Image: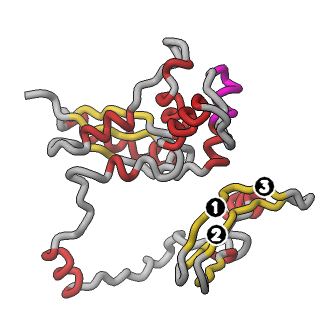
Amino acid sequence: MTEPVIIYTHTDEAPALATASLLPIIEAFTRAADVAVETRDISLAARVLAAFPEKLTTEQQVGDALAELGGLATEPEANIIKLPNISASIPQLKAAIAELQAKGFDIPDYPDEPENAEDHYTLSRYGKIKGSAVNPVLREGNSDRRAPLSVKNYARKHPHLNKPFAEGSKTRVATMGHDDFFSNELSVVLPEEDTLQIRFVGEDGTETVLKDELTVLKGEVIDATFMSAKALDAFLAETI
């Protein structure tokens, strides 16, 4: 028999704290059970580099971990711990490209307006990276997240009730309350079919189109929000 393996995904900045705290615990348990834990980098930066191997030196090239895990996800013996990853928007993708280029990786710019066949080919390769490119790949095959009917029936019969905090507990809930996604959220039901844009308006009034030709249907719900990074920093400093 081959040694059982669990693959743990390295993604983007957000789950770094989870990885630092959770991965050593997983490794401690699996070590005692003779189960190996391997890691795969499926971050946005790694996916960009994997898409353009011919542009990189041998030392800079990285394997296509997402494609590898996509194949594994269809196998019954697959064990993958997948952490949250960003759904790469065009601005996030461009920022990653610029950062990689600054570090000496010779990858092409994102072609906003393709002018030739090479630009269109580059755009198609980046198109496989942006957006929610990870979840559809890793949630196929044997990844069924529906709860069995017996579990649902038990939960209906025995609903979970939170117990009161023990006296002296230091646990508390803190929320921003302003300038966060919740407080800034706006929704609208569209009265007719339309074509929309997503624009960023700078403090000097300069407008940058982030997404164009967004086709919507009559009756669709359009929801948008934003968070102030400055307010978030202040909230974290005050809370911690």
Which three-letter amino acid code belongs to the residue tagged 1? Glu
Q: In this figure, which residue is indicated by the disc labeled 1?
A: 213
Q: Pick whichever of labels 3 and 1 is earlier in the sequence.
A: 3
The alpha-carbon separation of the residues under discs 3 and 1 comes to 14 Å
Separation of residues labelled 2 and 3 (CA atoms): 17 Å
Numbered tag placed on residue 203 in the rendering: none
Q: What residue type is labelled 3?
A: Thr
The answer to whether any part of residue 57 appears in the image is yes
User: Residue at point 69% right, 55% down?
Assistant: 210
Q: Where is residue 168 in the image (x, y as percent from the top left)?
A: 50, 74
Circle 2 residue: 195
- Crowding around mark 2 (Cα neighbors within 10 Å: few <14, some 14 to 19, many 20+) is few
| Crowd class of label 1 (few under 14; some 14 to 19; many from 20; radius 10 Å) | few
Is label 3 or label 1 in front?
Answer: 1
Q: Which of 54 and 57 is in front in this view?
A: 54
Q: Which of marks 2 and 3 is nearer the N terminus?
A: 2
Q: Which secondary structure is most common in the magenta stretch?
A: helix
Tell me the tag on residue 208.
3
Give coordinates of residue 61: x percent, y percent.
Answer: 49, 20
State if disc 1 and disc 2 touch (CB < 8 Å): yes
Split into 4 quadrants, where in the image is the C terminus?
bottom right
In the rendered image, the vertical position of residue 190 relative to residue 102, given as above or below: below
Residue 177 position (above or below residue 18): below
Q: In this view, does 93 lie to the left or right of 208?
A: left
Residue 13 position, x and y percent, is: 56, 44
- Which residue is located at x 33 percent, y 48 percent? 138
Say which element carries label 1. Answer: strand
In this view, the residue farthest toward the front is: 116
Report if residue 110 lies within the magenta region.
no
